[in-house]
Every structure is written in C-alpha cells, then in structure tokens.
Image: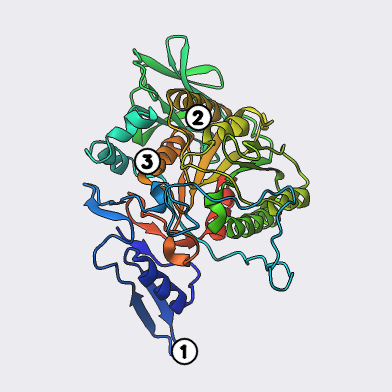
Amino acid sequence: MLRTSLKRALPLGLLLSSAFASGCSTYIVEETGDDGATANATSASASDGSSDGSDGWDSSAGGTSGGSSDSASGGDSGDPGGTGTSGETGGDSAGDTDTGDTDTGEPEPEPDPGQLTAGEWRDLDHWDFWLGLLNDPNWQAMEDMWRFYTSQRYAVVVEADGAHVNDAQVALLAGQETIWEARTDVDGRAELFAGLFGADVEGPLSISVNGVAMVDEAAPAAADPIVIQLDPVDPPAQVLDLLFMIDTTGSMGDELQYLQAELADVIDEIQTLVGQSFKLRLSVNFYRDEGDAYVVRPFPFTENIPEALDTLAAQDWGGGGDYPEAVTQALDSAIADHQWSDSAVARLTFLVLDAPPHNTPDNVGSMNVRVKEAAAKGIRIIPVASSGVDKDTEFFLRFIDIATGGTYVFLTNDSGIGGDHIEPTIGDYQVEFLNDLLVRLIAESVGVK
C-alpha cells in the first residue's frame, strides 16, 4: 500500500522521528533545497513488523491490514502502557478541572491547528476492492458482526438537462414496499441497497425519484451507475448542515485538544469559504458512556458560529472505563434528535471517535435503524477514526459511511501526536493534514472545488 506525501510538508526531523518511533509503514517525504534539487527521505518499518500494528496480510486487491495495537485492543490510547481500560478520568467540562500548569498556575497553551495528519478512503469509489475484502476469510466475519451486507448496491445518478440534480429523493422498492431511500448529493449521486441488514428481498425491484416511478426491474449497479433523467427541477435551498459528534471519554485525552483546534479551524475556514453563498447551520455534540458524567451532551443546530466554537473549546475528556462507548446513543441523538434541514445542498455528520459501540443485538439493531434513517434524510456519515481504533471498529465505521454515501477518514502516525494509529485495510492513499482534508470534503459536498 502506497502512502503519498503530505500536501504541506511537515518538518523532516519530525517526520523521521515519528516514523522510527512508531514503526509506521513506509512513506516518502520530499524536500526541495535552495538549488531546486529534491531529496527523498524514506522511513523504516520496525524490524519485527509489530510496532505499526500490521499483521502483514495483503488483500487480493493490494490492501494491507493492521492488527490491533495495545490501545486498539482496549488500552487507554493516551497511555502507551494501558491495560484494557478506555481511559482514565480526565475532568469534566463543567469547570471542575484545573487545566492550568501546576507549577506556574498559567494555563497550558492551546495547540495550533495543522498538526494532526490523516488519510481518506471512499469504498464506494473502490467497490471491487471492497467486495474483495469481504470475500477474504480474514474479513468475512465483519458482516455478521455488525449485520451489514453491502453486496446488493444500486448506485444511481440523477440528471436534468445535462446537469446533476441535488437533494432528489431516490427510493428502491419491492412492489409498494420501500427497501431503501437516499438523497442525491451535489454530483447527483445516491446509494441504494437491498438486503443491507441481512433480510431476503424478493424482486423485481424498481426505483423512484421524488415519488415518481423511473426504473422498472432494476439490477444491482456499482462502477456503472443507473443514470436517471428528469425534467428540470428546482434546486435545493442553499443550506449546509454540519454536525460534529465527538467522543470525549478518557481514551481521547491524547488527541482531544488537538482535535478541538483542528475542528475549530475547519469551521472557521468553511465559514469564510462558503458563508457568503450558503446558510451554514452548525451543531457540535459530545458523548461518553453509560455511568459517566453524561452519555450524550447535545447542542441544536445554530447559525451562531462563535457560540458553537466556544462550546467546542469548553469540552474536556473523562470517563469511559471499558473499550466500547455509547456510539449508538450518539447516533440516535445526531440523526433522530436534531432538526435537519428539509431542503439542503449537503448534510454531513462527522463522527469523531476511537472506540466502537457496545456490540449487543439491541445496539446493533438500533444502529441499523439510525443508519437507514440517516440515508433517507440525506445525512452522510463521515467517521474520523482516532488513535486506538481496532479492525472491528474500522470495518464498522466503513459500513456506516458506505450505507450513507460518506467516506472514511482516519488519523495517521505521521504527526507523532497521540497513541498508535493502525494502518487501515485499504489501497493507496494521500496523507494530508486533518484540517485541510476536512475542509476539502466539506467544500466538495457543496460543489466548491
């Protein structure tokens, strides 16, 4: 698996020290000297292949898997010597924690944005690769674990007068029964699925757009989507709904302050980039687990961006206690309990976390319901996987982004910040700074390139 260089070069010393410390997979850093010559520096992987969490398996499509690191197996990612707990108590954001320097009484400086590094992989754009993974014995059990069965995909593109139709309601039906619903994105794309949660679906299946039957006897489609032509339609409202749901349990303590700085920078940049053309509605939310100071701390959508940024900055980490967290309750709140716009160019949920939901039948069933509801509302889920994520969690996150037309974002070891980040089981990808990557994804969602 090739990892290409950062868009903005990190200092060479930081990259090399991070690489040798973490034993991360090989990457190349390019430096240009005063004479215009380019020097290539290549990191070395750990000699025993274990410190990057990799089990050395190569998928048939060229991906590389990583085994769970200690922190990914349940250790506190903020403590390299963690022993299976999901974080120590770090203080609650209600103001009962002294975050100042214990020697001087001075507050610790907030980190600057542009430090965390990340990659992105959209399985919907690499469908043969994804199906190859699920046909491999290493990963077949992931479908049964999370009750997601993605093979019957119906990719649709909706157009009118040669232009893409945004925010059209597209439905896959068996007779009069709606099997799956989605809304088109700015490129006219919608993703429909039959039997996504394992139920048998009897055909023939049809596809409707905005309640009008358009395709009879539809066949599964992926690389070559089903293209549907409409008469001209009105565009959606120039609205961008942007929701962040952030894990603030103890295991997030190694990266939370950095993430707060990065996300604040992203929000500020997006407001500058699209604020004159779109109504930006923002919601920042936080969750932990049962028995903690709170399970979900929600905040409604607002156009008061400075107020939302203050809320984001005020949060601290704490609680947890075991590896799984209240992800199910977090998505219940994000999808069902927030007032999403009826008409919008884009609706995005960024789920920032380092641990999976509790894997019980009730939780998995509830998660399936919320993911289906998100797709029907046009809410695209984009996970941001932090240090400590293991393979089970990675595949869970990729399932839910596939089902909602999203993409998978993951932090990498290149920054040298936080605990270990396992290599995802994917193909070639670009290492970027997290804030740049998220700004790019959000801008693309509203058609700003």
Q: Nearer the viewer, residue 448 or 22?
A: 22
| Tally of marks | 3
Which mark lies nearer to you, 3 or 1? 3
Q: Is residue 100 left or right of residue 174?
A: right
* Residue 383 visible in this rendered orientation of the protein: yes
Cα gap from disc 3 to disc 2, whole angstroms: 18 Å
The residue tagged 1 is: 34
Q: Secondary structure at mark 2?
A: helix
The first of marks 2 and 1 along the sequence is 1
Q: Nearer the viewer, residue 230 or 279?
A: 279
Cα gap from disc 2 to disc 1, whole angstroms: 52 Å
Mark 3 nearby-residue class (10 Å; few <14, some 14–19, many ≥20): some
In the rendered image, which quarter contains the C terminus? bottom right
The residue tagged 2 is: 371
Q: Amino acid at mark 3?
A: Asp
- Label 3 close to label 2 by CB (< 8 Å): no
Mark 1 nearby-residue class (10 Å; few <14, some 14–19, many ≥20): few
Cα gap from disc 3 to disc 1, whole angstroms: 47 Å
Q: Tell which residue pokes out farthest to the top in this image.
A: 176
Which mark lies nearer to you, 3 or 2? 3
Q: Amino acid at mark 1?
A: Asp
Q: Is residue 135 left or right of residue 284?
A: left
* Residue 378 visible in this rendered orientation of the protein: no
- Pinpoint residue 339: horizontal percent, then vertical percent: 69, 30
Q: Secondary structure at mark 1?
A: loop
Disc marking residue 265: none
The residue tagged 3 is: 392
Q: Secondary structure at mark 3?
A: helix
